[in-house]
Amino acid sequence: MREPYSEVTADYELWSCQDIDSTEDEVIELVGSLVRAMKPRLCVEVGSHVGLSSFEIGRALERNGRGHLHCFESTPQAARAVRERTAGLPVTVHPMTDLRFDPSELPGRVDFLFVDGDLDNRGASMNHWRDSLSENHVVAVHDSLKHWEVRQSIETAGFSERLDIVTPRGISLLRF
Protein backbone atom coordinates (compact mmCIF):
# COMPACT_ATOMS: atom_id res chain seq x y z
CA MET A 1 0.00 0.00 0.00
CA ARG A 2 1.08 3.60 -0.45
CA GLU A 3 2.13 5.51 2.64
CA PRO A 4 -0.83 7.47 4.04
CA TYR A 5 -0.76 11.26 4.30
CA SER A 6 2.12 12.86 6.17
CA GLU A 7 2.86 16.50 6.80
CA VAL A 8 6.58 15.66 7.05
CA THR A 9 7.04 15.54 3.28
CA ALA A 10 4.86 16.62 0.38
CA ASP A 11 6.01 13.52 -1.51
CA TYR A 12 4.69 10.99 1.02
CA GLU A 13 3.02 8.92 -1.73
CA LEU A 14 6.47 7.90 -3.05
CA TRP A 15 6.90 5.58 -0.03
CA SER A 16 5.13 2.30 0.56
CA CYS A 17 4.29 0.15 3.58
CA GLN A 18 2.81 -3.29 4.16
CA ASP A 19 0.09 -1.98 6.48
CA ILE A 20 -0.65 1.17 8.45
CA ASP A 21 1.40 -0.02 11.47
CA SER A 22 4.44 -1.25 9.53
CA THR A 23 7.57 0.78 8.95
CA GLU A 24 7.92 2.18 5.44
CA ASP A 25 9.43 -0.44 3.09
CA GLU A 26 12.22 1.94 2.12
CA VAL A 27 13.12 2.56 5.77
CA ILE A 28 13.22 -1.19 6.40
CA GLU A 29 15.71 -1.50 3.52
CA LEU A 30 17.77 1.36 4.99
CA VAL A 31 17.88 -0.31 8.41
CA GLY A 32 19.04 -3.56 6.80
CA SER A 33 21.72 -1.69 4.86
CA LEU A 34 22.93 0.02 8.04
CA VAL A 35 23.31 -3.35 9.73
CA ARG A 36 25.01 -4.76 6.66
CA ALA A 37 27.51 -1.87 6.62
CA MET A 38 28.10 -1.65 10.40
CA LYS A 39 28.70 -5.39 10.93
CA PRO A 40 27.33 -5.26 14.50
CA ARG A 41 27.72 -8.18 16.86
CA LEU A 42 24.60 -7.43 18.89
CA CYS A 43 21.39 -5.73 17.77
CA VAL A 44 18.19 -4.95 19.64
CA GLU A 45 14.85 -4.09 18.09
CA VAL A 46 12.11 -2.60 20.25
CA GLY A 47 8.62 -3.05 18.82
CA SER A 48 8.92 -5.67 16.10
CA HIS A 49 5.25 -5.60 15.02
CA VAL A 50 5.06 -8.48 12.47
CA GLY A 51 8.80 -8.79 11.89
CA LEU A 52 9.44 -7.01 8.60
CA SER A 53 12.40 -5.05 10.02
CA SER A 54 13.41 -8.04 12.13
CA PHE A 55 13.68 -10.16 9.00
CA GLU A 56 15.74 -7.51 7.19
CA ILE A 57 18.12 -7.09 10.14
CA GLY A 58 18.40 -10.86 10.61
CA ARG A 59 19.12 -11.35 6.93
CA ALA A 60 21.81 -8.65 7.03
CA LEU A 61 23.44 -10.32 10.05
CA GLU A 62 23.35 -13.68 8.28
CA ARG A 63 25.00 -12.15 5.20
CA ASN A 64 27.59 -10.50 7.45
CA GLY A 65 28.45 -13.91 8.91
CA ARG A 66 28.17 -12.58 12.46
CA GLY A 67 25.83 -10.91 14.89
CA HIS A 68 22.53 -11.60 16.59
CA LEU A 69 19.27 -9.67 16.91
CA HIS A 70 17.09 -9.62 20.01
CA CYS A 71 13.52 -8.48 19.22
CA PHE A 72 11.06 -7.26 21.82
CA GLU A 73 7.37 -7.43 20.97
CA SER A 74 4.77 -7.37 23.74
CA THR A 75 1.76 -8.45 21.65
CA PRO A 76 1.73 -12.29 21.72
CA GLN A 77 0.25 -12.74 18.24
CA ALA A 78 2.76 -10.28 16.73
CA ALA A 79 5.65 -11.97 18.57
CA ARG A 80 4.60 -15.31 17.03
CA ALA A 81 4.54 -13.70 13.59
CA VAL A 82 8.06 -12.32 14.14
CA ARG A 83 9.29 -15.75 15.27
CA GLU A 84 7.82 -17.41 12.17
CA ARG A 85 9.13 -14.74 9.78
CA THR A 86 12.68 -14.88 11.19
CA ALA A 87 12.96 -18.67 11.59
CA GLY A 88 16.45 -19.80 10.65
CA LEU A 89 17.97 -16.35 11.05
CA PRO A 90 20.17 -15.17 13.96
CA VAL A 91 17.17 -13.70 15.77
CA THR A 92 15.72 -14.24 19.23
CA VAL A 93 12.19 -13.00 19.85
CA HIS A 94 11.27 -11.94 23.36
CA PRO A 95 7.46 -11.79 23.74
CA MET A 96 7.61 -8.94 26.24
CA THR A 97 8.25 -5.25 26.53
CA ASP A 98 11.94 -4.39 26.46
CA LEU A 99 11.58 -2.49 29.73
CA ARG A 100 10.98 -5.78 31.59
CA PHE A 101 14.23 -7.26 30.22
CA ASP A 102 17.56 -6.92 32.01
CA PRO A 103 20.12 -5.87 29.36
CA SER A 104 22.91 -7.50 31.40
CA GLU A 105 21.46 -10.86 30.30
CA LEU A 106 22.71 -10.21 26.75
CA PRO A 107 26.13 -11.58 25.77
CA GLY A 108 27.71 -8.15 25.30
CA ARG A 109 27.06 -4.53 24.53
CA VAL A 110 24.52 -3.41 21.94
CA ASP A 111 25.97 -2.06 18.69
CA PHE A 112 22.68 -1.29 16.92
CA LEU A 113 19.42 -0.35 18.65
CA PHE A 114 16.27 0.10 16.56
CA VAL A 115 13.48 1.73 18.57
CA ASP A 116 10.06 1.43 16.94
CA GLY A 117 7.69 0.46 19.74
CA ASP A 118 4.79 2.33 21.30
CA LEU A 119 4.99 6.06 20.56
CA ASP A 120 4.79 7.06 24.22
CA ASN A 121 7.46 4.54 25.32
CA ARG A 122 10.33 5.48 23.00
CA GLY A 123 12.08 7.68 25.58
CA ALA A 124 11.84 4.99 28.25
CA SER A 125 13.28 2.43 25.83
CA MET A 126 16.20 4.67 24.84
CA ASN A 127 16.99 5.31 28.52
CA HIS A 128 16.63 1.61 29.35
CA TRP A 129 19.29 0.58 26.79
CA ARG A 130 21.61 3.61 27.12
CA ASP A 131 24.12 2.06 29.53
CA SER A 132 24.23 -1.16 27.48
CA LEU A 133 25.36 0.46 24.22
CA SER A 134 28.82 -0.22 22.80
CA GLU A 135 31.36 2.51 22.07
CA ASN A 136 30.50 2.49 18.34
CA HIS A 137 26.73 2.19 18.73
CA VAL A 138 24.02 3.60 16.50
CA VAL A 139 20.48 4.16 17.73
CA ALA A 140 17.82 4.38 15.03
CA VAL A 141 14.43 5.75 16.08
CA HIS A 142 11.45 5.46 13.75
CA ASP A 143 8.54 7.95 13.63
CA SER A 144 10.92 10.67 14.81
CA LEU A 145 9.62 13.48 12.60
CA LYS A 146 5.89 12.80 12.42
CA HIS A 147 4.99 12.27 16.08
CA TRP A 148 5.62 14.91 18.73
CA GLU A 149 5.99 12.30 21.51
CA VAL A 150 8.92 10.71 19.70
CA ARG A 151 10.53 14.06 18.81
CA GLN A 152 10.27 15.15 22.43
CA SER A 153 11.77 11.91 23.77
CA ILE A 154 14.76 12.26 21.41
CA GLU A 155 15.28 15.92 22.30
CA THR A 156 15.37 15.18 26.03
CA ALA A 157 17.46 11.97 25.87
CA GLY A 158 20.85 13.69 25.72
CA PHE A 159 22.19 12.44 22.40
CA SER A 160 25.43 14.03 21.23
CA GLU A 161 24.86 13.31 17.52
CA ARG A 162 21.64 13.28 15.50
CA LEU A 163 20.85 12.82 11.83
CA ASP A 164 17.21 13.12 10.79
CA ILE A 165 16.27 11.40 7.55
CA VAL A 166 13.09 12.72 5.98
CA THR A 167 10.56 10.00 5.24
CA PRO A 168 6.79 10.27 5.79
CA ARG A 169 7.31 9.33 9.44
CA GLY A 170 11.02 10.08 9.78
CA ILE A 171 13.94 8.08 11.09
CA SER A 172 16.67 9.54 13.25
CA LEU A 173 20.15 8.08 13.63
CA LEU A 174 21.58 8.92 17.03
CA ARG A 175 24.63 8.48 19.24
CA PHE A 176 25.10 9.17 22.93
Image (tube, rainbow, N blue to C red):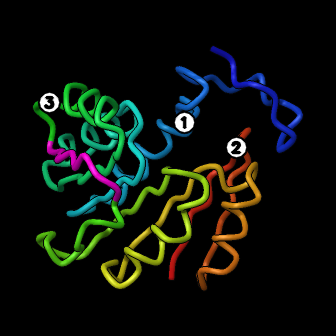
Residue name at image x 29 percent, y 59 percent: 43
For residue 169, the mark is 2
Earlier sequence position, callout 1 versus callout 2: 1
Residues drawn in magenta: 90-97
Residue count near mark 1 (Cα–Cα under 10 Å), binned few <14, some 14–19, many ≥20: many
Residue 14, quarter of the rendered image? top right
Q: Amino acid at mark 2?
A: Arg
- Asked if residue 121 is among those painted magenta in the image, a careful observer would answer no
Residue 120, quarter of the rendered image? bottom right
- Looking at this view, name the residue that lies furthest to the top: 1
- Asked if residue 95 is among those painted magenta in the image, a careful observer would answer yes
Is the residue under label 2 in contact with that under label 1 (CB below 8 Å)? yes
Q: Amino acid at mark 1?
A: Thr
Residue name at image x 28 percent, y 52 percent: 96
- From the top left corner, tell me how far across and down residue 157 is, in percent: 59, 80
Q: Amino acid at mark 3?
A: Ala
For residue 23, the mark is 1
In this image, 18 relative to 80: left or right? right
**Real-space Cα separation, disc 1 to disc 3, in angstroms:** 20 Å
**Real-space Cα separation, disc 2 to disc 3, in angstroms:** 29 Å
Earlier sequence position, callout 1 versus callout 3: 1
Residue count near mark 2 (Cα–Cα under 10 Å), binned few <14, some 14–19, many ≥20: many
**Real-space Cα separation, disc 1 to disc 2, in angstroms:** 9 Å
Quadrant placement of the N terminus: top right
- From the top left corner, tell me how far across and down residue 11 is, in percent: 83, 30
In this image, 32 relative to 104: left or right? right
- From the top left corner, tell me how far across and down residue 144 is, in percent: 67, 56
